[in-house]
Image (tube, rainbow, N blue to C red):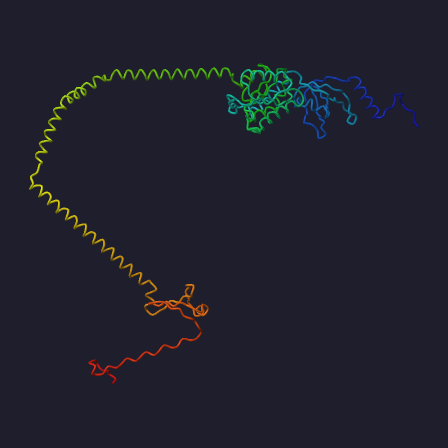
Amino acid sequence: MAEPLSNLPEYSVSEISQAIKRTMEDTFGQVRLRGEISGYRGPHASGHCYFALKDESAKIDAIVWRGNFGRVRQWMEEGMEVIATGKVTTYPARSGYQIVIDSLEPAGVGALLAQLEERRKKLAAEGLFDAERKRPLPYLPRVIGVVTSPTGAVIRDILHRMADRFPVRVLVWPARVQGDGAAEEVARGIAGLNALPETDASGARFRPDVLIVARGGGSLEDLWAFNEEIVVRAAAGSAIPLISAVGHETDTTLIDFASDRRAPTPTAAAEIALPVRAELVATVEELGARQRRSLLRLVEQYRAAVLSARRGLPRLEDLLAIPRQRLDTASLQIGASMRRLLRERAQRVAAARLSPYSVRNAVARGRDRLSSVEQRLLRIGAQDAERRRTRLDRASGLLRTLSHRATLERGFALVRDLSGELVRTSDAALGAKRVSVEFADGSITADVSAGSAPPPPPRPAPKKAGPKGGGQGSLFD
């Protein structure tokens, strides 16, 4: 075996790779690395995320393991400048080095604002911020839904202000408002309150009439959950009017553009959602007082109009003066008129007195009229009696025609058994044994026995008339 030409130690590829790896990890350990995300395509099927961080002259591969991806994914966006905290290591299979990221944050407010502006333009282009989508808030909601943290001071401030202004039913949907998963919980809260039924089992209103999404103040990073697309789209798609109350008056998030109304603070959201009950009561009382005053003024106006019209009318004494004078005159003349009337009546009675001759003539005329009436009544009575007699004769003839006795008079007989039932057949007669036979002139009882009836006797031939009979002789004699 040939001797080595150098005194340098000999390493395998794996040995030198491991040595470099240990040197890199021991030298750098945990580092904070600033750079721009490049080549980001979302998480791998395994859940890990692979991309690169670069600046103007260099690039380093980066890895985010599946367990850390949920904490940093809100800052994972192509082209975004970030500060990554992690461990620098090597990948021997490719003879490369890389950083395994444990945490990620934006590299300053400028980067966040640039990302925020780009997202705002994108959502605005879709029409989610259009003024035509804004809906008016109900004047006096019966139920208010609030999406916020149930443990913070925000919900206490909102409930306290609502109780002061106008106590109503409040439904609180608990949600995290900062950190990992906050955006998803806020979006689920908006969708969940929209999905509630209109009424509960008792028939009371249950679905909110207005929604409030609230959070206290904080930095841009703290409020970032309300800039996420999932929250903005949930607010824009809400069927219930929504008030955004995120941060303080100077803080602005994308949900403010998608909501129907923006409140500068959570407390102001409660003031926007509800009127002041005391002010409403005072307003109603003032309107009632104004109505009463208006009615009184209207009554006074009508009273003044009636008084003015009355002054234009003549006095009652003037209207009755002439009729009263006519009445007085008539009352003075009534005595003389009565006496004159009595004299006229007496004269007419005297003139109407008749002589005995006139009385006899009047009695005779009356007797003649009475006789004429009597004759007329007798004539009418005779005519009516004649009509009734004619109708009675017709009915009697019809009765005789339809009666069975007419049939009996023509030589027929009516046969009954001893119980009075009609016997219509010979078999029935034999069964009865004794029958009653009714003829036209009476009835007999006969015993019935079987046998044939004797033939009828021959009719005698008509006698021929001779010449002496004075009749006409037969032509065949």
Q: Is residue 265 visible?
A: no
Q: Quadrant of residue 267?
A: top right
Q: Is residue 280 above or below residue 420?
A: above
Residue drawn at point x = 28 percent, y = 80 percent? 462
Residue closest to the eye, 261 or 118: 261
Q: Is residue 27 left or right of residue 394?
A: right
Q: Quadrant of residue 125?
A: top right
Q: Is residue 441 visible?
A: yes
Q: Position of residue 211 (x, y in %)?
A: 57, 22
Q: Quadrant of the C terminus?
A: bottom left
Looking at the rendered structure, the number of numbered marks drawn on it comes to 0
Q: Position of residue 226 (x, y in %)?
A: 61, 21
Residue closest to the eye, 232 or 213: 213
Residue closest to the eye, 147 or 367: 367
Residue closest to the eye, 221 or 139: 139
Q: Quadrant of the N terminus?
A: top right
Residue drawn at point x = 43 percent, y = 63 percent? 419
Q: Position of residue 23 (x, y in %)?
A: 81, 19
Q: Position of residue 430 (x, y in %)?
A: 45, 70
Given the current orientation, which residue lies at the most extreme right position?
Answer: 1
Q: Is residue 86 above or below residue 385?
A: above
Q: Is residue 139 left or right of residue 174?
A: left
Q: Is residue 393 left or right of residue 10?
A: left
Residue drawn at point x = 44 percent, y = 74 percent? 450
